[in-house]
Amino acid sequence: MTTRLLINGKKAGLEEVRNAVFALRKEGFDIQVRPTWESGDIERLVLEAAQQGVTRLIAGGGDGTVNEVVDAMLKQGFTDCELAVFPLGTANDFATACHIPTQSYYQALKLAVNGKSVLIDVGKANERHFINIATAGFGAQVTATTPVALKNFLGGGAYTLSGLVQAINFQPFKGQVKYDGISKTSHVVVGAICNGRQAGGGQVLAPNALLNDGYLEAVALEEFTPADIPTVIEELTNHEPFVGKFVKRERVKRVEWSSDTVMPINLDGEPISELNVVISVVPSAIRLVVPEECPLIGKFSA
């Protein structure tokens, strides 16, 4: 097996990271390292790996780096290669939900080089892929506009702090949503289409989501007034699939959104802006290395 670590260049010089690589090489694991330098490097490095017959890629970085690797692999049809995650970001939402180690670089990298892989689904938003969650509206604005320095200083809590500041003047997005033969007008405060379970620095949006069930979990919080807050909180804490007055939860394979104003959308930490977006599940798209008891992998009978 040829294992190659594609690592965010900002993290490549960390002593703890280098020590983990050297330690595992001493144990007999052949880990090739390719750091990034500028925009577009991930796509180029994935193409290079495909041409050279690499059998396992490790995405070393935050959720955005993982997103770039997944998107590049699927766009290039490089799906016979396994993917592992070496979490080096601020929040590491996807890795945390999968129970991939985030407190020990050595343990995380050892799982990445030595763990077993399983087939998982990914999401697709227009022509872009995502592995964890696509957030829209207020949630996407918070993540896209939180300064890097604030993220580094406060960790995942930066998202919550930035969100509280922005919520004061936030206006819902009005648009048309279609799914499962249903079409309706919606005023969205926060929307999320979930393959994984959490985003935004530890906010669990879809606690029942699975990576290998052929579905995405759609969650939407619609416009409400201060007087509605008790109802909103009650509905948000109900994690079962249901359609409440303000919180809507559905299992879907495809969702369409159209609006007259641009809706900010965030794919695993990577922002895009679209008037019209189609989000769909791509079942059994890629092989992901996860812990043996990963809670996001469902056990289905043949």
Image (cartoon, rainbow, N blue to C red):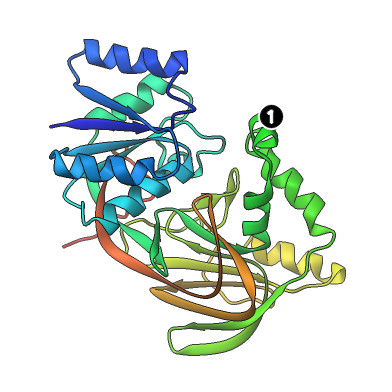
| Residue 214 seen in the figure | no
* Number of marks in picture: 1
Q: Is residue 111 left or right of residue 64?
A: left
- Image height of 198 relative to 183, above or below: above
Q: Quadrant of the C terminus?
A: bottom left
Question: Which x, y percent locates residue 148?
Answer: 64, 37
Residue at mark 1: 153
Q: Residues within 10 Å of mark 1 (few under 14, many from 20)?
A: few
Residue at the (70%, 35%) spot, across then down: 150
Front-most of residues 99 and 77: 77
Mark 1 residue element: helix
Front-most of residues 102 and 25: 25
Front-most of residues 15 and 274: 274
Q: Quadrant of residue 40?
A: top left
Residue at the (41%, 76%) spot, across then down: 254
**Which amino acid does the dot numbered 1 rest on?**
Phe
Question: Which x, y percent locates residue 137?
Answer: 65, 65
Q: Is residue 87 left or right of residue 27?
A: right
- Image height of 148 relative to 22, above or below: below
Question: Which x, y percent locates residue 84?
Answer: 30, 38
Q: Is residue 82 left or right of residue 129?
A: left
Residue at the (25%, 29%) spot, across then down: 113
- Image height of 111 relative to 73, above or below: above
Front-most of residues 84 and 59: 59
Question: Which x, y percent locates residue 175?
Answer: 63, 81
Residue at the (65%, 62%) spot, across then down: 236
Q: Quadrant of residue 226?
A: bottom right
| Residue 269 seen in the figure | yes
Q: Quadrant of the N terminus?
A: top left
